[in-house]
Amino acid sequence: MDTTSFTKKSISGVGVVEPALTPPTFATTQPTFAKKTKIGTGKSKTKKRDIPEGLWTKCPSCETMIFDKELDENLKVCPKCQHHFTIGSRERIHSLVETCTFEEMDATMASVDPLGFKGASTYRSKLESYKKNNTLKDAVITGLCKIGEHRVALGVMDFSFLGGSMGSVVGEKLTRLIERGTEKGLPVIIISTSGGARMYEGMFSLMQMAKTSAALAYHAKRHLPYISVLTHPTTAGVMASYATLGDLILAEPGAMIGFAGPRVIKDTTQAELPPGFQTAEFLLDHGLIDAIVSRKEMKAQLIAYLDFFTAEKKIAAV
């Protein structure tokens, strides 16, 4: 399209030619102004430093990022909201027992596959996998130790081994622990965390409920104290046997405690469950447990309870 023009008369009478709207075509396509370089578009020559994993943990309750070293020093308790993380049996023993006083019992006892259980994976393969990747032989550690000035028989379960499930080895180790405590006249303390009886062993696992309960009955006949500590989670067969037979039943804050899961109970009863159902706080209000004790205060509280239980013997000895 050709460029059109028109003549405009000025005051002096000299005609001035003005271009129309269509701009004239230039011989060169080079822009009048040089294009500016965008700031920050160039790639940095230095690479970002990768932050190593395993240094920080996010609290599932308050979502605070906690430095792992600080979390370990605080016994795996969130310093902001006091959420109690899962803790291993060895760590728990270390937090409660006087240095170099723990004498482990039945350390080499390990589970077998009496039923030849087969499923998506066999019970034998599961056991081999857990033993290969874990220092534990099974879901409980038992032994004699000192807590404060008191000699006690202590059993600590570990949820990291097959969900802390109670099979023949767990029942046998706890029964032997209770019987040793009865024989030596010692208080028994069992710290529970479990998903219940171990289904891979069928009736053999269910028999452990009666066996451990019977051992505790003989222990009670000797007028010896038994303290049960419930941690998150304590459910099913363990909850229905030795975990709730204590002369004193303690629990950690926020622990889930119950027999069946909330969904099963709701489907069975066809009723809405109350808020906080199956938490330690709910069960304390309704009289199932005697006290809620923070992990950081557990050792001091156990010593105080043991002082109370053994006060009569000390007076008699004098």
Image (cartoon, rainbow, N blue to C red):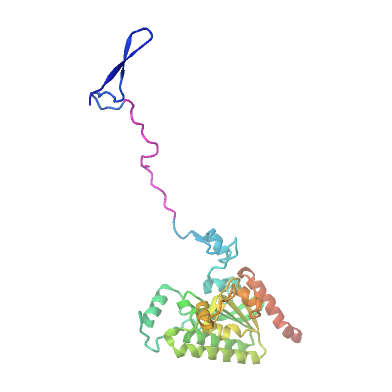
Residue 97 visible within the image:
no
* Location of residue 106 in the rendering, given as x and y in whole percent from the top left corner: 50, 84
Q: Which residues are magenta?
A: 32-51
Residue at horizontal 47 percent and vertical 80 percent from the top: 138
How many marks can you see?
0
- Identified at 68% across, 79% down, the residue is 306
Is 240 above or below relative to 42? below
Quarter-wise, where is residue 287 in the image?
bottom right
Residue 123 relative to residue 313: left or right: left
State yes or no: residue 103 in magenta: no
The residue shown at (25%, 27%) is: 29
Between 110 and 114, the one nearer to me in the picture = 114
Per the picture, the main secondary structure of the magenta-coloured stretch is loop
Q: Quadrant of residue 84?
A: bottom right
Quadrant in the rendering for residue 1: top left
Image position of 314 (left or right of 7): right
Q: Is residue 116 left or right of residue 61?
A: left
Query: Residue 34 colored magenta?
Result: yes
- Examine the rendering and report whether any part of residue 270 can be seen: yes
Placement of 250 over or under 220, stated as above or below: above
- Image location of residue 302, percent across then percent down: 65, 76
